[in-house]
Amino acid sequence: MDRSVRITLVALLLIVLLIFGLVVARQVYLVGGDPQPAPDLSEFNTYVYDQAKPLAEFTLTNENGETVTREDLKGRWTFVFVGYTNCPDICPAAMANLRQMDQRLPAELPQPDYLLISADPEHDTPAKLKDYTGFFGEHFHGLTGDLETTRALARSLSAVFVHREVDGELLVDHSGHFALLNPEGQLQALIQPPHRPEELAEAFERIYQWAKANREQISS
């Protein structure tokens, strides 16, 4: 065989091997590669966990008087806020911001739920929660029940609350952030105040697209 022909065949073989290697490497990256890191959303006062955090186990009651556990939060994205219906300022503003955010969400995004966990279960009955959350929209819900169970759940959402009495009236000091749960019912992000509806919508869209891309990468 002519020397130039041998060189040509070797070169072609090397090219074929290179292409094959690139294809294999791409498949390894897509199937077994590391997931994309969480997006930096500090401009929206938002911290996104690379690995979502599990919630404390709980059994509480929703605004319809139905029993709710951690398993019932699976299957959808949920914005959670720890507050109470008699809150004079922070809670109404927070809920209103969520309602305005909901109105700004693009149609292609999944519809999230909005959940108020009562930090005053002694007074926040299911009926009272239903009246309160119903004012903000059909996707707004509430949970109430055992105080210590609620405290443990709040801690797993990086939230705290403290009861105090002023002139015979119960006031509750509580965290002001939103916790975003993913469809596995796990804590995916914390969104600190101040809350602006347009920024909340943008943060949710960015988190959703990131989570979707990682899910598709794993399933490819």
Image (cartoon, rainbow, N blue to C red):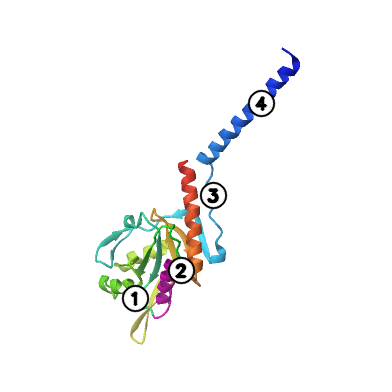
Q: Which residue is mark 3?
A: 36
Image position, residue 88 (x, y; %): 39, 81
Magenta residue span:
88-103
Q: Amino acid at mark 1?
A: Thr
Q: Are marks 2 and 3 in contact (CB under 8 Å)?
A: no
Q: Amino acid at mark 2?
A: His
Q: Which mark is residue 177?
A: 2
Q: Are marks 3 and 1 in contact (CB under 8 Å)?
A: no
Instruction: Count the numbered circles shown.
Output: 4
**Which secondary structure lies at badge 4?**
helix
Q: Is residue 52 above or below residue 193?
A: above
Residue 50, visible in the rendered structure: no
Front tag of 3 and 4? 4
Nearest the eye: 178 or 167: 178
**Image quadrant in which the N terminus is located:** top right
Circle nearer the N terminus (3, 1): 3
Seen at 62% across and 27% down, the residue is 17
